[in-house]
Image (tube, rainbow, N blue to C red):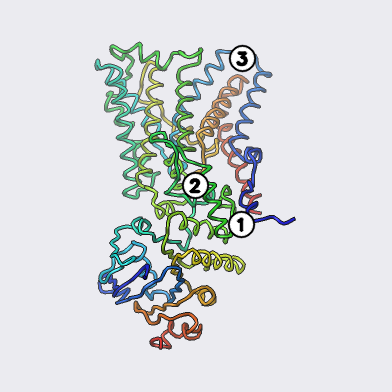
Amino acid sequence: MAVLELTNISKHFGAIHAVSDVSFSLEPGEVVGLMGDNGAGKSTLVKMIAGNFRPSEGRISMDGKELVMHKPVDARHHGIEIVHQDLALCDNLTAAANVFLGRELRKGVWPFAILDYPAMYQRAGEIFRELKSETRPRDLVKQMSGGQRQAVAIGRTMLSQAKIVLMDEPTAAISVRQVAEVLNLIRHLRAQGIAVILISHRMPDVFDVADRVIVMRRGRKVADKQIGRSSPEEVTGLITGAIEQAA
Amino acid sequence: MSVTLEQTIAHKQHGWGTRLLNSQTFWVLMAVIAACIFLSLATNSFATTANLFNITRNVTFVAIVALGMTLVIITGGIDLSVGSVLCLCSMVLAVVMHAGYGIEVGILASLGTAIIVGGFNGVLIAYFGFPPFVVTLGMLSIARSLAMVASNNTVVFQFGPDHDLLLSIGGGAWFFGIANPVVYMVVLALLTGFVLRWTKFGRHVYAIGGNEHAATLTGVPVKQIKVAVYVISALSAGIAGIIQTGWLGAVTTNIGAGMELQVIAAAVIGGANLAGGVGTAFGALVGAALIEVIRNSLGLLGINAFWQGTFIGGAIVLAVMFDRIRNFRQSD
């Protein structure tokens, strides 16, 4: 059964139709590349899944049940985790502190509950091990490489029983070697049955890691194909409008 | 021999020794200790009970307020109103007690005032997006003016039925001959240190200073915490005001004037970063101590008091310079 299903989703801002009548579904452990030019409606679509916006029309459902979200934290409660483009990390804190930010583990009884440092270091260490990332829980994020920072941001999504991870341009501003690291992180998420929506401008990354590609243009979905049945040339054509609609 | 992923993840990059040598607070503490040793040798008057009693007690007022200020600075804010709030809270205490109420009523009224003032600052900053500098600058003016209104700009030196109790709370030495204000300072510093290091609230204070946007996205209650931080800052000023009233035995409308700058200086010398995200309770005490030792030593060494500002200003710049040098080295 589909873990996430969007049915005839539209979003208007006044007279502007940012997203019109988009439907798609996502299976567990599936990596979907979401592509499109700036202003194609990718961000709006993702923000509706993330709980930032409510759709004007249509429904979003998870495991067959309709989702109603009022704020981003609601999405997290439903098992939707977001890796923001800027990663949303605090440079002055350790990797473990960032992974647990807003969800710190504590021991003891309120008002004497204190932060459980050993448990957080240990769990963060386990997560980095699962991600096969050389990231030390006790290091400050300030001193980390782009790939390690990605691991910290992705590590957050693995704290809870996430079902869907939305990644916004995770490979936009990092070196070639780190891109490979990030794509590996995505494969590790998939291996654990987590569905990933990868928003990206980078064609090679999408064709390297995704199972399916969805292309948006002017608020509409113009393609939804298995990666093996498409090609970078076709996707480029769809993004620019040289090809009107995928075959 | 190959290093496994396991070992890499478990590796601690810095031992506590390296971390100590990298901390601004440690070097300022060393400076304080060196200055104390030098002064003990160079003068007969420094290492006397009376002088040490004086120094420790003088440190406390700035240090207590600096504890609250450190929290504000860690979130990336600033509170310029603390000197005036200290004056207002002292005056509320004095006026209430002078009118014949007991000390409990006086202290409650005084701390209540601090909470209202801090809450006002915090709500404007957190919920209405005012710059902290502007809001607290306004409050600096408002609070002192309200203190004048409350007292009709007179000196209050009679505190009703609990007069003696108030004076002994502030001026006594109940605990092994240590001045009471020093005891309060130590207790408050331990409390602040505990909150910063061991509670979720403390962790979130650092997170807001590090990246406010990230804190919001990860579900940290940023606005509530910001309000709380300004309330704590005002409360620390109020507590210092109450203690100072008991110590001085009189309140005028110019106590705490210009104190905000000393307090900010103490926090910054102690390692708090005005850009946010960095600072400790212990640092606030050490910073306040360095300022006081400088002041005291200039007097003892017979150097003209006009030089005080130069030396304290120099200490601020020097302390931050260490931090800059360290950052340059790291970014290489």
- N-terminal label among 2 and 3: 3
Residue at image x 46%, y 82%?
Answer: A235
The residue identified by callout 3 is B45
Q: CA distance from mark 1 to mark 3?
A: 58 Å
Label of residue B275 in the image: 2
Whether residue A142 sits left or right of residue B34 in the image: it is left
Question: Mark 2 falls on what kind of element?
Answer: loop
Q: Nearer the viewer, residue B290 or B16?
A: B16
Q: Residue furthest right?
A: B1
Q: CA distance from mark 2 to mark 1?
A: 30 Å
Residue B175 on image: x %, y %: 48, 14
What is the three-letter code of the residue carrying label 3?
Ser
Instruction: Please tell me whether mark 1 or mark 3 is closer to you in this view.
Output: 1
Q: Position of residue B174 (x, y in %)?
A: 45, 13
Mark toward the viewer: 2 or 3: 2
Q: Are marks 1 and 3 in contact (CB under 8 Å)?
A: no
Q: Which residue is mark 1?
A: A134
Residue A23 position within the rendered picture, expressed as x and y whole percent measured from the top left: 33, 76
Residue B95 visible in rendering: no
The reply to whether label 2 and label 3 mark residues of one chain is: yes
Q: Chain of mark 3?
A: B
